[in-house]
Image (cartoon, rainbow, N blue to C red):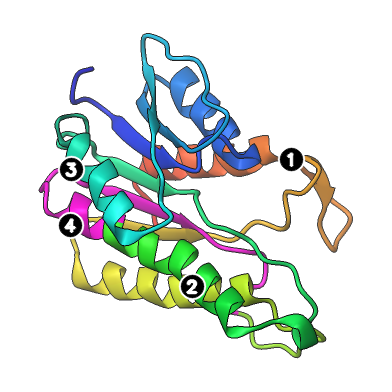
Amino acid sequence: MSEKNKILITGASGLLGKTLVNRFKSGGWLVLAQYFNNRGEDSMNCKWIYGDFSSKKKVDIFLNSNHSEFIDCCALINCYGPITYKKTRKLNSDDLVSDFYGNVIVANDIISYFLRSGNLKHVVNIGFESAGDIRSYKNILSYAIAKNALLLLTESYDKTYKYVTFSMISPPSLTGGKYKKVNGKSVAPEEIAKEIFEMLRDGGSDV
């Protein structure tokens, strides 16, 4: 793989992740696709890379063992992030810690590693539809708390590293593929992937 327009997409075997891989492949990018289960097929401009993010040590192994592939990446999409759905009364500290680790700490560790390469130009973190909103909630979702923390982290990085574009995209739930927004407009993962692709192509920020 050459160094031109190379991107790492974490969580690439998920619903949005697969769509992002296909969008960037068809758009002429060289794609590194991280997976834990459900590996996709390698091709001329796509390589699937196994990665276990269940501990900081395993994240370090993933990053260091693939250093030669990552050194010339200019873009990163953090699509990985566990989602815990529980009623507030059933939540416990383990749920909060797990979702915070998976959605925030893992993303932070990968971003920090890529920043050290000196070639990083774009980072996109995936949030959830209400990230950053001030509103009342019937239930507290541990992953939603984590995604709001990820938004703050994204904004902090964006202010600190002026030579890198940091963005956070907060799509509605992608469960089941197609979905409808509050205004009734039908949206599919392909539209989210297209938005991210065009944003990176144009060099814009959407924090």
User: In the rendered image, which quarter is residue 69 located in?
Assistant: top left
**Where residue 79 sits in the image (x, y, percent)?**
50, 49
Q: Is residue 125 magenta?
A: yes
Q: Relative to 128, say whether 52 is above or below.
A: above
Residue 21 visible here: yes
- Give the residue number, with chain letter if any, for mark 4: 163
- Give the residue number, with chain letter if any, for mark 3: 64
Closer-to-camera residue (120/87): 87
Between circles 2 and 4, the one closer to the viewer is 2
User: In the rendered image, which quarter is residue 188 located in?
Assistant: top right
Q: CA distance from mark 2 to mark 4?
A: 27 Å
User: In the rendered image, which quarter is residue 22 located in?
Assistant: top right
Q: Relative to 142, say whether 23 is above or below.
A: above
Residue type at mark 4: give it.
Tyr
For marks 4 and 3, the one nearer the N-term is 3
First to last magenta residue range: 110-132
- Give the residue number, with chain letter if any, for mark 2: 100
